[in-house]
């Protein structure tokens, strides 16, 4: 299966790897991550499977997943790396639950 980012021909960003060694705030890498986290295609939700139902902009229809994506962006923007890691794990878990129901 492809990620939603791949479906939209965007480069997949490895958020787990990024969060293993996050940059200092502010920095070029930090601002780049903020920009990626702001867009549904390149955020943590966009790096999940492309079969998850979404709007035209990539926003997940699932309200829990959507909320987690917003919290993830807020954590990245705030430089709250541990919180972002925890939210990313929740995004991955919720995505697995949605995919399991679809298959």
Image (cartoon, grey):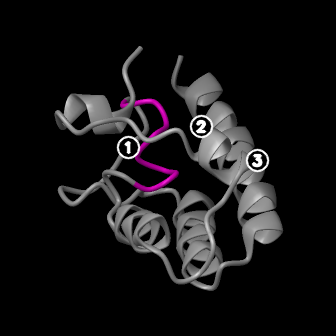
Q: Which mark is residue 96?
A: none
| Mark 1 Cα shell of 10 Å, populated few (<14), some (14-19), many (≥20) | some
Is the C-beta separation of discs 1 and 2 under 8 Å? Answer: yes
Q: Is residue 78 above or below residue 57?
A: below
Which residue bears the numbered disc 3?
89
Name the N-terminal-most of marks 1 and 2.
Answer: 1
Q: Look at the image and give the residue range highlighted in magenta.
A: 43-50
Which residue bears the numbered disc 1?
53
Kindly report the distance in space between the C-alpha atoms of the residues bearing marks 3 and 1: 19 Å
Instruction: Please tell me which residue is depicted at 18% across the width and 37% down the height of the picture.
Output: 8
Foreground tag (3 vs 2): 3
Instruction: Please tell me which residue is depicted at 52% across the width and 83% down the height of the picture.
Output: 26
Is the C-beta separation of discs 3 and 1 under 8 Å? Answer: no
For numbered disc 1, what is the local secondary structure? loop
Which residue bears the numbered disc 2?
98
| Residue 34 image point, x, y percent | 44, 72
Task: Indicate the quadrant where residue 57 lies.
Answer: bottom left
Q: Looking at the rendering, in which quadrant would you find the N terminus? A: top left
For numbered disc 2, what is the local secondary structure? helix
């Amino acid at each position: 299966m492809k990620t939603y980012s791949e479906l939209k021909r965007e480069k997949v960003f490895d958020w787990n790897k990024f969060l293993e060694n996050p940059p200092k705030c502010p920095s070029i890498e930090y601002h780049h991550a903020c920009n990626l986290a702001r867009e549904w295609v390149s955020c943590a939700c966009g790096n999940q499977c492309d079969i998850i139902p979404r709007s035209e902009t990539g926003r997940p229809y699932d309200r829990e997943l959507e909320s987690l994506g917003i919290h993830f962006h807020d954590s990245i923007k705030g430089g709250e790396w541990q919180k972002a890691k925890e939210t990313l794990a929740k995004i991955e878990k919720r995505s697995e639950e949605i995919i399991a129901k679809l298959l």
